[in-house]
Amino acid sequence: MTDLYPAADERELLRRAASAHTTAAADVEAFLRRLPEVPDPADITEYADLLSREERARADRQAAADAAGLRLPSVESE
């Protein structure tokens, strides 16, 4: 029988993953707020790094949600 509620440790892992994703998204926002009108190559590299980190954090959050039993059906349209 499947438990209706995920184990406390799975929920805590999900909370931590969600927090890490929130932090990564906030870092992207902070970067965009200070971005100069004409970005230089270093800005573009930093943006790519920040986006990569945010995407990894999102994927980690999703994996933690799946492990906690929060799987959602696909919302893609055909």
Image (spheres, rainbow, N blue to C red):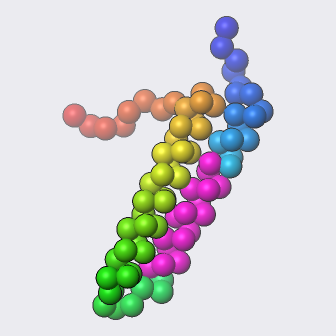
Q: Quadrant of residue 13?
A: top right
In this view, the residue farthest toward the top is 1
In this picture, residue 21 sits left or right of residue 8:
left
- 61 lies above or below 21: above
Please say whether residue 30 is one of the residues in the magenta stretch: yes
- 10 lies above or below 58: above
- Please state which of residues 1 and 61 is positioned toward the viewer in this rendering: 61
Please say whether residue 4 is one of the residues in the magenta stretch: no
In this picture, residue 10 sits left or right of residue 73:
right
Q: Position of residue 4 (x, y in %)?
A: 69, 21
* Magenta-drawn segment: 17-32
Q: Position of residue 17 (x, y in %)?
A: 62, 48
Q: Position of residue 52 (x, y in %)?
A: 42, 59
Give the residue displayed 33% in from the left and 86% down from the top. 39
Q: Position of residue 49 (x, y in %)?
A: 43, 67
Give the residue displayed 52% in from the left and 41% down from the top. 62
In this view, the residue farthest toward the right is 8
